[in-house]
Structure formats: C-alpha cells, structure tokens
Amino acid sequence: MSPLPNYSPNQLSLGPLESEILNILWEFESATVKEIHDRILSDRDRELDRASVTTVLNRLMHKGWVVCHKQGKAFQWQPRISQPEAIMLRAHARLHQFLAVSNPDVVAAFADSLDAASLDQLEAIAERIRAARQARKEE
C-alpha cells in the first residue's frame, strides 16, 4: 500500500483550465509556456492567449502544484507531484471531508446503500490496511 506523498499542494481544488494545463505537464513531465500553449491550440476550436497560460501556471505555482526553472531563455514548468499522487491526495481529502460529518447515522446510511461490488472493494481495502499495519508492527 502506497503511503501518502510527503508533499501536498497548498490548495487541492483546481479550475478547468488549471486541470487541463496540469494534465499536459504530467504528460510532458516538463514543458515551456509555448509547448503548453501549442498543445492547447492543437484543438482548432480553441482560442487562448499565451499570456493566459502563463497566468494559469503562476496560479498553479502559488497553489503549490508546479515549479518553474529557467533553462536558457525559456522557463521550464514541472509538476511537483505525480498524477497518481494527486489522485491519492484528493481521495484522502474527500474521505476526511466525508468523515468530518461526524454524524454516525449519515455514515451508516452511506454504508448501508453500498452494493455488493462496493462491499467487496471495501473488504479488499480493509485487508490492505490490516497488512500494512502488520508490516509496520514487524519493522
């Protein structure tokens, strides 16, 4: 079972264009504003100024999602965490929001509404938790 990443962005919520640009960075691993802009404009139905890409990248940097390094005359942008790590962090945050309801009736009603496939999945998760806890005890 993978542990949560050591690093987490300051803000997990992203707008649609922020998500799109982050997905491009995950695909490229590192890219310039021009490369990201060209990728977005590869869809002929899209219009977007290069300055807008820069603005969104700066927002992503302030939220803690990306870093920027100067290479020659261009700036290279890179994601600070991988896509699987981002999925894990978002799922963890959603689970904590759900459990923060702190009303056992709400949680019980949710658990009662799960279908058989979901119950099998929960059992598999519980087994992984037991194995991870046992492995920590043995260390």
Image (cartoon, helix red, strand yellow):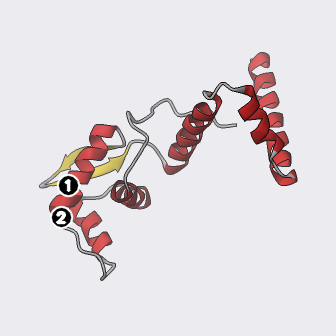
Determine contact: label 2, label 1, CB under 8 Å: yes
Q: Identify which residue is drawn at 73% across, 33% down.
A: 107
Q: Which quarter of the rendered picture does the C terminus lie within? A: top right
Q: Is residue 47 above or below residue 26?
A: below
Q: Secondary structure at mark 2?
A: helix
* Crowd class of label 2 (few under 14; some 14 to 19; many from 20; radius 10 Å): some
Query: Horizontal and vertical percent for residue 79?
Result: 38, 47
Q: Is residue 107 above or below residue 35?
A: above
The residue labelled by disc 2 is 50
Q: Identify which residue is drawn at 31% across, 81% down.
A: 45
What is the quadrant of residue 131 in the picture?
top right
134 left or right, relative to 106: right
Q: Identify which residue is drawn at 12% across, 55% down.
A: 73
Q: Which mark is residue 54?
A: 1
Q: What's the distance in space between the residues labelled 2 and 1, CA to CA?
A: 7 Å
Query: Horizontal and vertical percent for residue 100?
Result: 60, 27
